[in-house]
Image (spheres, grey):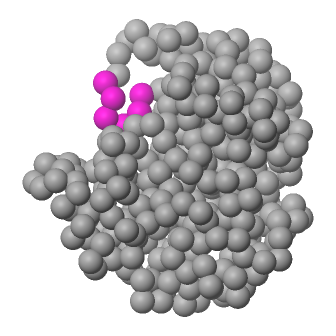
Amino acid sequence: MTSFEPIGSKDLLRMSDLAQHEVHGILATAANFKRNPAQLTGALAGKSICMLFEKPSLRTRMSFEVGAFRMGGQAIYLDHKDSPIGKRETISDYGKNIERWCHAIVARVHSHATVAGLATATHIPVINTLCDMHHPCQALADLQTLLERGFHFNHSRLAWVGDGNNVCHSLIEAASILGFGITVVTPKGFEPDATIVSQSVARSMRSGARIEITNDIGAIQGAFAVYTDAWTSMGQTDSAAKTSAFEPYRVDRELMAIAGPKALFMHCLPAHRGEEVTDEVIDSTNSVVFDQAENRMHAQNALLCHLLSPQAVASKGSATNPAHFNTRTQETTRA
């Protein structure tokens, strides 16, 4: 693609808000910006981003704040950990105030209804950076990381092991859009949301994606990468029964061997070492967890530009040649 194709949706609340060519365009722009960071200069000049956070954050907050700064924009952080959005005043009133001052809302919240309410009430883009059901920004960074390592949408397969949670949902939707394979392996009773799976399977009839939901760990054999997440998400209550159910799904050396010696290990972080993953796996040479963390910023920078400054993206150009995704940090290159 040599010409810029705008995003049809005003908001990004879930991966399925994006069409296939839009995901390709964002990923191409992310790779381009990562390879040529000088092109970011002034891309968001004069733009203010409101960051509404009901949950603590390291990667999401840092990646958006640093990214906005590098593009000449402003990120304003509003801490709502002790005062959930909609408690002091309605979500609609809150959003209608913010849109008078800011150009976009970045929201990390407990409930998907909150980001949906903000999107309905406002005329500015609302970006879901995590809710109970979806995590599209994480999925975009994960896709960029996979492409850098040679993942191919036509024949590669990703394996998810653990809880069928929000990140899992976004990756299933990503697979259904782009046409790659995904095998989701969970303990019984912890499968991903049935509605999201059925919608994604229907979408796969057009994209050719292969979506498998199973409790059998052996199904990860031959996967390009093995992805896991915390067994208990932030804000959820832990229990001995849940821990017992997940213990056979801990990603250790033996489990990775089922996937194969070249399989990558992925985790959206923070990791609970010794629970869902062992040190020897997350610290191995096959682990790309810190590449994923870095790529949060690059993917989000691209998303912000496509939503807020499409003319900047158009003037800089982008390409979807897979070779252009082979971008690593200096540290990775030296390794």
Residue toward you, 144 or 313: 313
Residue toward you, 283 or 67: 67
Query: Against 280, is 144 above or below?
Result: below
In the displayed structure, does residue 240 sit left or right of residue 225? left
Residue at (78, 38) in percent of width and height: 206
State the count of labels. Answer: 0
Residue at (42, 83) in percent of width and height: 47
Q: Residue furthest left?
A: 88
In the displayed structure, does residue 80 sit left or right of residue 305? left
Residue at (74, 34) in percent of width and height: 204
Query: Against 304, is 177 above or below?
Result: above
The percent coordinates of residue 251 (x first, y second) are 64, 26
- Quarter that holds the C terminus: bottom right
In the displayed structure, does residue 89 sit left or right of residue 53? left
- Quarter that holds the N terminus: bottom right
Residue at (82, 36) in percent of width and height: 208
Give the extent of the magenta segment: 232-237
The percent coordinates of residue 250 (x first, y second) are 60, 22
The percent coordinates of residue 200 (x first, y second) are 65, 33
Query: Against 314, is 157 above or below?
Result: above
Residue 46 lies in the magenta stretch: no
Residue 252 occupies quadrant? top right
Residue 275 visible here: no
The percent coordinates of residue 140 (x first, y second) are 63, 54
Main SS, magenta residues: loop
Residue 19 visible here: yes
